[in-house]
Image (cartoon, rainbow, N blue to C red):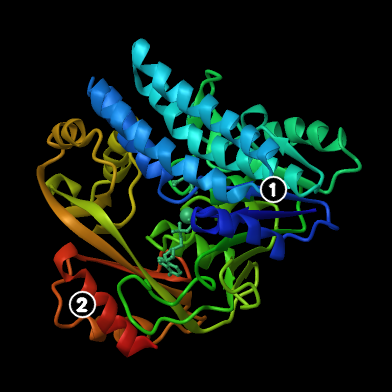
Amino acid sequence: MKVLKFGGTSVGSPERMKKLLDIIDPSERQIVVLSAVSGTTNNLVEIGQAYLAGDKAKAAVLIKALKDKYEIFIKKLYAKSEYLEQGREVIDYHFGLLTNLSKDLFTNIEEKVVLAQGELISTTLYHVYLKEIGLPSVLLPALDFMKIDEDNEPIVDYITEHITPLLDAHPDINLFITQGYICRNSFGEIDNLRRGGSDYTASLIGAAIRSEEVQIWTDIDGMHNNDPRIVKGTTPIAQLSFDEAAELAYFGAKILHPQSVFPAQKYKIPVRLLNTMDPKAAGTLITNESEKDKIKSIAAKDGIIAIKVQSSRMLLAYGFLRRLFEVFERYKTSIDMITTSEVAVSLTIDDTTHLAEIEKELGAFGTVDIDRDLTIICVVGDFGAEKHGYAARVLDALKHIPIRMISYGGSENNLSVLINTSDKTEALRSLHNRLF
Ligand code: ADP
Ligand code: ASP
Ligand code: MG
């Protein structure tokens, strides 16, 4: 059974929603994961923020504006008044819920309820559309099987256990529709898999049902060899290994949610990145295989903070790094890059939630310096057994740009450099011209 995920632009208009059936083959049993209609989650973020700020009037204005968009959407989606009426009920229900949130205390828990409405609306509207055209399908409520634990980690066995009976209950149905992004947390509350999380949903379901393939349908023909939003002339990569794809996703290639590769990798499920606007394009296939000895792609991750701890006590001392890393562990803050010298260590984080506490605790080890507004540029590929020449080519392409840190050798397929965000565009372009 395949899992097909369609992103926000792929369901971004009634016309696009209808065209999904050019891609979905109703004669095959499959699970279709949908994102919210493009723009909706951003609007819901604004609504949540207005409520959190206590600005109910602003929330009401934003809710009305979004509802108006859906009024137009359903008029174009349905041909028959009976189904238009059903679509209207869907909208009335979800926007009624958003409006009613003004009546009670609004906390982060309610905010997540707000954020969940986009996928709930898109899947329900699509399900009604399939009914209108007479195509049998079942709407699987993601909130009944998608779950994260107290560390926000999804639980694949739980998903398997809870989705299997839902599928088995409908042996005659081929088409199952479900929501990307949304889940329940360890308290049973509505939660989500972070922005862009529908990719993660698809991969988790793929893992849970041991799917033959996960397809991520989006608005571009696969993973490109550089960020197409910044660099002209980027080209799609035919084949990537799970490790390469994971590095690119983690280090900023927006086409894939950072964690979405891992479940597929663990259960060896091929992932294809495909283009809804050009379904015949080959896209990118992600498996255990990869083209050897080749630089594949470049990605960039902004919002990076570098922390340098300088201490003469580090000289010849063992256990120093462990104690240093324990500080980050205590504050559940993950580290991306690390470089060390005999008297100093520099590392980067992107989550600043506990930066003040971390800085204070690190003060016990030595002098702490913090640099902000940095970007990690990550060059990904298979650097081969010999590993000669790659680092030189990358650094040569960046010789006119100040480099704060370099990380190489951590894995076979990643070379990262830390630069000022203001140099990012030039760095990406220069690397592109020199490496491809
Ligand atoms: P969806 O809504 O379908 O999930 P996203 O906007 O999340 O789509 O991801 C697709 C976008 O990712 C593309 O339109 C492209 O601008 C951006 N992107 C960034 N880096 C890359 C890359 N290396 N290859 C392909 N797309 C990329
Ligand atoms: N709708 C969610 C978002 O915009 C999830 C997704 O599109 O993958 O982040
Ligand atoms: Mg996305």
Against 226, residue 99 (above or below) is above
Where residue 181 sits: x, y (%)?
53, 41
Where residue 383 sits: x, y (%)?
47, 79
Against 81, residue 373 (above or below) is below
**Considering depth in this image, is 132 or 16 the residue closer to the camera?**
132
Amino acid type, mark 2: Glu
**Considering depth in this image, is 382 or 216 the residue closer to the camera?**
216
Specify the label residue 207 is tagged with: 1
Residue found at the very far right of the displayed protein: 172
Amino acid type, mark 1: Ala
Task: Give the image quarter of residue 100.
Answer: top left
Residue at position x 86%, y 44% in the image: 173
Against 375, residue 116 (above or below) is above
How many C-alpha atoms fall within 10 Å of the one at disc 2: few (<14), some, or many (≥20)?
Answer: some
Q: Provide the secondary structure element on which disc 2 rests.
A: helix
Residue 300 appears left or right of 365: right
Q: Quadrant of the C terminus?
A: bottom left
**Considering depth in this image, is 43 or 270 the residue closer to the camera?**
43
Task: Give the image quarter of residue 431.
Answer: bottom left
Q: Spatial distance from mark 1 to mark 2, Cα to Cα?
A: 39 Å
Task: Give the image quarter of residue 125.
Answer: top right
**Is the residue at mark 1 in contact range of ligand 2, meaning its CB lies under 8 Å from it?**
no
Specify the label residue 426 is tagged with: 2
Against 175, residue 148 (above or below) is above
Residue 214 appears left or right of 105: right
* Residue 179 visible in the picture: no
Residue at position x 86%, y 32% in the image: 169
Residue at position x 51%, y 47% in the image: 73
